[in-house]
Image (cartoon, rainbow, N blue to C red):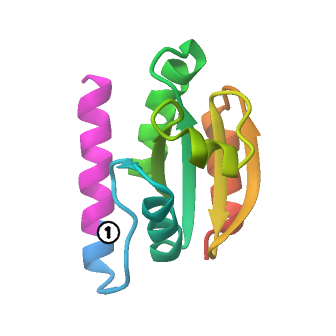
Amino acid sequence: MSDNDTIEELREQKIENLQSNGDTGTHSPADPIRIGSSADLSEAVERYDVVVADFYADWCGPCQMIAPVVEEIAAETPAAVAKIDVDANQQLAGEYGVRGVPTLVLFADGESVEQLVGVQQKDELVAKIEQYSS
């Protein structure tokens, strides 16, 4: 079984679990959301309880290393993942003090609560998300 098959199975499980709970609230998407503006990020932060904003660059080796982990976080946790290309969104990166990539900014209940710079371990990210999830 490939990693893509595993991720797809996890997505399907997450959708089934959410549907079987009968909860009609706004659920985080199983795939990362592409952010193109400050308004897009604000909308995501307002819409979802926990958001992991991944500030990345296509040319960045460490960003490419963490990308599969970020996709798994989107599929496996209650957090929404927002992908922000710093080259295309320099002003937005500046607003959040992003000086290096990858930088992950964790939002909970509409507020920025954590900023992590560099490659992060999946289990540490999951623990951070669980800390802020209701």
Q: In this view, does 9 lie to the left or right of 105?
A: left
Q: Give the range drawn in magenta.
A: 1-16
Q: Residue at x 25, y 44 (%)?
A: 9
Q: In screen coordinates, is 105 left or right of 25? A: right
* Depicted 93 relative to depicted 30: above or below: above
Residue located beneath label 1 in the image: 17
| Quadrant the N terminus occupies | top left
Q: Quadrant of residue 114?
A: bottom right
Disc 1, SS: helix
Would you call the spot at circle 1 few (<14 residues within 10 Å), some (14-19), or many (20 or more)? few
The kind of secondary structure the magenta stretch mainly shows is helix
Residue type beneath disc 1: Asn
The residue furthest front is: 91
User: In the picture provided, is 48 more to the left or to the right than 110?
Assistant: left
User: Where residue 19 appears, x then y in whole percent?
Assistant: 25, 76
Residue at 49 percent across and 14 percent down: it is 59
Nearer the observer, 85 or 11:
85
Q: Where is residue 46 in the image (x, y as percent from the top left)?
A: 51, 75
Instruction: Give residue 34's position: percent from left, percent from top.
Output: 37, 47
Q: Where is residue 91 in the image (x, y as percent from the top left)?
A: 59, 45
